Amino acid sequence: MIGPLNTPHEYVYIPDVARILFRLIQEEKAYGRTWHLAGAGRITLSELIKLVESITGRGLRKLVVGKRSLQVLGLFNPLLREVAEMHYLQTQPLFLDDSALTELLGPLGKTSYDEGVRASLAAEMEPRQ
């Protein structure tokens, strides 16, 4: 995990993003503007970990990587170098206002973190073809 773990954020469930983008591209009034989509509520990575642990019934090993570690790893991996540059996004709360999007499209139908984690874990357990 990229730390710290107790900074509140909002995360979006990718299928929600796809559904909302599909609705958005059908809306003529949407073109030429920037739109923000907030998550299903405020949550920390610690709370997400606890949610995964409660659903799976087992504890998870955690490795928290901070900015300095990312910078060192970034010497060998360009992606991690970029993640280190953007680390400030993990250290401060980050919330988006999607009221304009809601005004345009109506209710957005966001998936709860509990439901999203359950669906993600179930998808990960499906056999790969």
Image: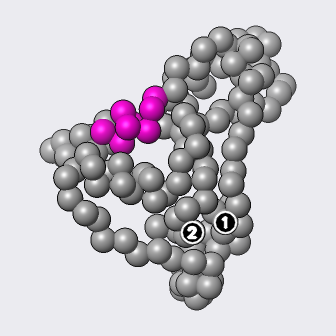
Where does the magenta region start and end? 111-118
Name the element at disc 2: loop
| Amino acid type assigned to the residue bearing label 2 in the image | Pro
Name the residue nearer the viewer: 113 or 15: 113
Q: Mark 2 vs mark 1: which is more N-terminal?
A: 2
Q: Position of residue 124 (x, y in %)?
A: 26, 47
Name the residue beneath numbered marker 2. 4
Contact between marks 2 and 1 (CB within 8 A): the answer is: yes
Distance (Cα) linking label 2 and label 1: 6 Å
User: What label sits on residue 91 in the rendered view?
Assistant: 1
Query: Residue at position x 38%, y 37% from top?
Result: 114
Name the residue nearer the viewer: 97 or 27: 97
Query: Residue at position x 24%, y 40% from top?
Result: 122
Is residue 74 among what the camera can see?
no
User: What label sits on residue 120 in the rendered view?
Assistant: none
Q: Position of residue 35 (x, y in %)?
A: 75, 30
Query: Residue at position x 45%, y 32% from top?
Result: 112
Q: Position of residue 128 (x, y in %)?
A: 19, 46
| The magenta stretch spans residue 117 | yes
